[in-house]
Amino acid sequence: MPGRAARRVSPVRPTLRRVSDSPGTTETPLARTRRARRVDRALEVRYPDARCELDFTSPFELLVATVLSAQTTDVRVNLTTPTLFARYPDPAALAAAAPDELEEILRPTGFFRAKARAVTGLSAALVERHGGVVPHRLEDLVKLPGVGRKTANVVLGNAFGIPGITTDTHVLRLSLRLGYTTSEDPLVVERELGELLPRKDWTMACHRLIFHGRRTCFARKPACGACPVAAWCPSAGIGENDPVRATAMLKG
């Protein structure tokens, strides 16, 4: 209207979180390292029983179980492997397994034909290249059919006590949510997470992240109101924030 000065509208500024929205913006590398280690200590208190949830009695059993765990649950694999290893107790036996018999045992794990080929192939390679013994070097493990860095690090960390970063789906998701990385590339996440945590803690830190992802920080709706690391998480608040409702969501 004539005679009235135009009003100036200030732009709305986003509310800042306690920690940075993404690595490298308002958080220094040193601060991120300290935060990551603080988070790991808090998760250690929350999950004192964190461990590999696949049942095994030997490196060979863990290697096969880890391959079978793709696209299914550890619980399902643990229900299947007793029968599998009773019938085929070593690489030589599994390499010589009749496809139809093996597929029937593995059917409950899903994708059983592909998994049958995978475990017979890696078993044959163990016999031919390593005398039926699972190697304890990453470079040897990843050369086995169907074995990538994730599987190799599971075996190294849990069967041989050699620290490794296991970039499974939970570790990848939580590394993004916690602001440890901005990448979804497993190799990048493995490197960046390894730079934040002491090498001796790599295996157990991954177990704790996996436990947290399965029990609290769910993919679709995390239980933020019952999260022990919410104060240090840039993603805090994206899930259920009411403490009572969040606590009811917890698993395990």
Image (tube, helix red, strand yellow):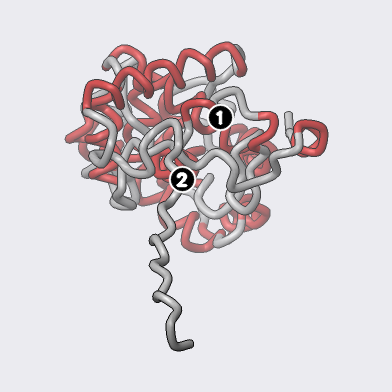
Q: How many marks?
A: 2
Q: Which structural element holds mark 2?
A: loop
- Is 48 left or right of 136, judged from the image as shown? right
- Tell me if label 2 and label 1 are in contact, CB under 8 Å: no
Q: Position of residue 178 (x, y in %)?
A: 43, 36
Q: Which residue is mark 2?
A: 15
Q: Position of residue 221 (x, y in %)?
A: 65, 49
Q: Using the rendered image of the protein, determine whether residue 93 is visible from the camera's viewpoint.
A: no
Q: Position of residue 230 (x, y in %)?
A: 56, 29
Q: Nearer the viewer, mark 2 or mark 1?
A: 2
Q: Which residue is mark 1?
A: 230
Which amino acid lies under the numbered mark 2 shown in the image of this protein?
Thr
- Is 67 left or right of 71, judged from the image as shown? left
Q: Residue at x 33, y 30 (%)?
A: 165
Which quadrant is the C terminus positioned in? top right
Picture quarter containing residue 147?
Answer: top left
Which amino acid lies under the numbered mark 1 shown in the image of this protein?
Ala
**Residue nearer the viewer, 4 or 142:** 4
